[in-house]
Each structure stands twice: as C-alpha cells, then as structure tokens.
Amino acid sequence: MAARLDGVSTPARVAGPGEGVSAQELALAARNHGLPLEALRYDVTPPGLHYVLTHYDIPATEADGWRLTIRGEVDEPLALGLGALRAFPAVTRRVTMECAGNGRALLSPRPVSQPWLVEAVGTAEWTGVPLRTLLAAAGVRPTAVEAVFTGADHGVERGVEQDYRRSLPLAVATGDDPEVLVAYAMNGAPLPPQHGHPLRLVVPGWYGMAHVKWLREVVLVDAPFTGFQQAVAYRLRQSPDDVGEPVTRIVPRALLVPPGYPDFMSRIRVVRPGAVPLEGRAWSGHGPVTRVEVSTDGARTWSRAELDPPDPSNPWAWRRWRHRWTAAPGRYVLSARATDAAGRTQPLEQPWNRGGFANNLVQRVEVLCPAEPGAGDGPGTEEPGHDSDGGPARP
C-alpha cells in the first residue's frame, strides 16, 4: 500500500459562511467542463460538448499494444487487445451520463470540490462489447461477488495515492438491465483522449464515477471492494464520521434549453413578448421519465409539458420535452422538474450531503421580457408581468 501524502492533499471539507470559490476549485473548473445548455438541443451530444470530469491526469495511452486483463475469480484469465475485443459482436447504446457532483456549487453550505452548476451531463452513443460477454468467456467462478475496474489514471486524493478504481456488484456486471459495456467508440469514432481512449466502462443509469475511463483491468473478487473511490468517496454523508450510503443510480432531472438570448456575465436570458417555445431534456437512472412539469413563476405553480414518445431502443437516454409559454413584459424564473416511473420527483429543497452528490434540485433560469422589443431594460428594472396561466410573475 502506498504511503499517505497528507502534505499535498487536504481532507474533504465544507465551505465556511461567505467563503467564495477558491483558486483550486477554479483550476478544477478549467480542467473539467460542462455541457453548454444550448447543446441540449442535440439528441446525441458531440464529443467536444459532452461534460468531462477527470480526477487526475489524462494518461498517455496508445491503442497499439493496449491490453485489457480479466483475472481473479475466473476460470481462464484473459488479456485482450483492441483487435481481440473488436472480434466479439459489437453493440451500440445511447446513454445519458451525469456526474454525481452535478449541482454541487449550488448547495449551501457548499462542499469544496469541482464546482459544478447543472451542466455536468451529456448523451452519447457508445460502441463496444457487453461486459457479461467478456466475463462469460473468462468463466465466472461461484466465489465471485464483485468486479473491480482499474483505469490508467493515477494520482492522490485526500492523502491516498491510487489508481482510479471502482467496483460493481456481480449482478450488475453480468446483467442485462443495464447492460454494461466495455466501449471503444463514442458517436461512431474512437474514444477521444478525455473520454477514456482507448477503452472505458459504460454503466447505463449510473452516475459517471462508475464509468471507469482508460480501462486496463477487470478483477473478480470474492469480497466487497473497499478501495478509496468505493468506501471513502462517493458516499452520501451528513457528517464526517457518517459511513453513508453509496452513490449509485442517477436520480431524475429535467433541464431547459435556455430560451431567448443571454447577458454575457449574468447569463440572464432575454425573450421577446409573445409566444416563447420552451424545451429541454429529462432523464433518470431509476426508470423512464413519465412526467415533466414547467413553472414560469419561481416554482409556485406548474404546468404539464409534452414529452416525446418513449424510445424502446434507447431506454437509458434522455427524453425531449416541450412547453409553450406566452411571455408578457416582466421578470421571471423558469423551472422544470421530472418524475420517473419509480415515482421519484425532483425536490424544491436541496438534498444536502457533504460531498454534494445526487443533488437534483430543480433548475432556476432567470428571464427578462422587456416592455418593448430591443429596449434592453437594465437588470435593476422591475416590470409587472404575467405567466402563461395569467398569474402575476413574482420570482
């Protein structure tokens, strides 16, 4: 076991009252980018717009000579190059992926880490080999209980030197709902470096921490894995000594394509009076989204949005929703919330935990509708308005 490196790695903490985002957090934000919300218009996110979270460095990897080893509680250990993997029947799955820390920077008090707002999401078409196919080829022993996945990225976190390593229960690793992939292509092309070239894991319905990038090893073990990223990180804790529940599947979320056009700094949206089409995407890892509602008055009242029909061929991808709003001069706060088939609904109050994980608080989008088209009322102007149901707008 590597020695602890406390001198270069600080413990997890929560920001103090009035504490702003630190230079270290800004450095993380510069490395890890979110989806520009206007890109929610794409059914499939272009790779350069898909969110990225890299724990350590993007490793130097070459497809030639890369080997995926499968060992541990198996009958026949395997070492597979990309050619051998491509010889297996390939499948392509459209999957919405979201970072477990999405929304962290909006929490109060704020957990100090990568300062995500709501943009840590994307949907891609991943091509590869089902993990269960590879495990069947290796022969799973009855003693196996988990599969442990190791990436090529190496670093230090909270004093622990480590490779990035996560596990899945054997039932998930070998199951078909979801069908876990060892992927070598994204949107029909080889994986880009930041998305795990040449191999990565894709676990539909689970938060991004489970989708191990730069995958180099799968080990079946006969006892639960207790590595850092499993037993210490990605737990829903209320206090430092709380063991917490593990972060697993994605909770429901709906996001709006920002309407109108933005102010450069504040990102407040400006729309013209009259009909304003609202649209966005909704998803959940617990089941299909069955309802999306929209509010134009600061989440006081809600109207049902129109959902695109379900796509049986892409059950793990987001669904488009639409709503028609008639804007009158005034200032508004728009929101959307999703409900899935398991009955989970986005909350109006923040679901706080020390890591800032699984925070699916409803989005709030500030919108100004000027009294005259192009009038450009300043941000301090207060104009009376009405929502689409005729109620006063008082965000």
Image (cartoon, helix red, strand yellow):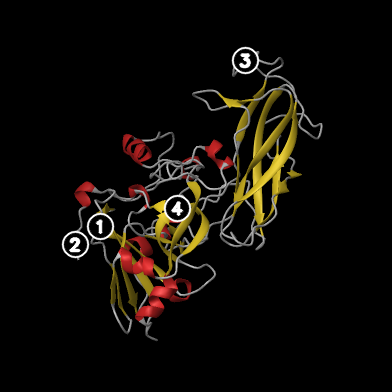
* Element carrying mark 2: loop
- The circle drawn on residue 280 is none
Which residue type carries mark 2? Ala
Q: Nearer the viewer, residue 356 or 330?
A: 330
Give me the C-alpha separation between circle 2 and circle 1. 7 Å
Asked if disc 3 and disc 4 are in contact, CB closer than 8 Å, the reply is: no
Q: Quadrant of residue 153?
A: bottom left
Which residue type carries mark 3? Gly
Asked if disc 2 and disc 1 are in contact, CB closer than 8 Å, the reply is: yes
Q: Where does the image place residue 15, in percent across and percent down from the top left? A: 40, 41
Q: Is residue 98 left or right of residue 191?
A: right
Q: Which residue is mark 4?
A: 188
In the image, which is nearer the foreground, mark 4 or mark 1?
4
For the residue carrying disc 3, how many other residues have a C-alpha within 10 Å: few (<14), some (14-19), or many (20+)?
Answer: few
Q: Is residue 23 left or right of residue 289?
A: left
Which residue type carries mark 4? Gly
- The circle drawn on residue 2 is 2
Which residue type carries mark 1? Val
Q: Where does the image place residue 265, in percent across and percent down from the top left? A: 49, 24
In the image, which is nearer the foreground, mark 3 or mark 4?
4
Q: Which residue is mark 3?
A: 376
